[in-house]
Amino acid sequence: MRMSVAMAGINGAMAVALGAFAAHGMAGADMDYARSLVEKGAHYQLIHAVALVAIAALVRQVPNGKILRIAGYAMLVGILFFCGALYVIAFTGLSVFGAVAPIGGLSFIAGWLLLAVAGYKHCSA
């Protein structure tokens, strides 16, 4: 899961950078909506970057980590579609990307549920 750790680092750095940009570079009342979208995207991106690190660590502990790997991929898809859609809307104003965000949200939910299944299957009581 070396790639998961690398993707977690890249996504964590992006989330912090975009969050800082929203806080410092998107000033003014006219930017309130766009700033809120970037902040929300950065928040979700950072949470799921941390989750990717946790999943990568767990994969090393589980004999067959297929479910965990799929959970990680689902979270990456969630970052791309949910956070990506929010960023596109914020920076371009193309609200049609609002239709893409729920795909990412469902991917996040699937990732967390797959993590739960893997925990139930592979962790002793």
Image: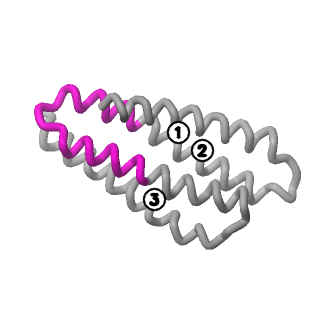
Above or below, 56 against 95 in this view is above
Q: How many neighbours does mark 1 have within 10 angstroms: few (below 14), some (14-19), or many (20 or more)?
A: many
The disc, 3 or 1, on the residue closer to the chain's N-terminal end is 1
In the displayed structure, does residue 90 sit left or right of residue 107?
A: right
* Visible residue check, residue 124: no
Label 3 belongs to which residue? 104
Check disc 2 and give the amino acid type: Ala
Quarter holding the N terminus?
top left
Q: Position of residue 44 (x, y in %)?
A: 52, 47
Q: Main secondary structure of the magenta part?
A: helix
Above or below, 13 against 108 in this view is above
Q: Residue at x 44, y 36 (%)?
A: 7
- SS state under label 3: helix
Q: Residue furthest front?
A: 3
Does the CB distance between marks 1 and 2 fall below 8 Å? yes
Does residue 75 belong to the magenta stretch?
Answer: yes
Disc sitting over residue 46 in the figure:
1
Q: Range of the magenta residues?
A: 51-77
Q: Residues under labels 3 and 2: Cα distance?
A: 14 Å
Quarter holding the C terminus?
top left
State the image quarter where residue 58 is shown.
top left
Q: Residues under labels 1 and 2: Cα distance?
A: 6 Å
Check disc 1 and give the amino acid type: Leu
Label 2 belongs to which residue? 42
Q: Position of residue 9 (x, y in %)?
A: 49, 30
Q: How many neighbours does mark 3 have within 10 angstroms: few (below 14), some (14-19), or many (20 or more)?
A: many
Does residue 69 belong to the magenta stretch?
Answer: yes
Above or below, 76 against 63 in this view is below
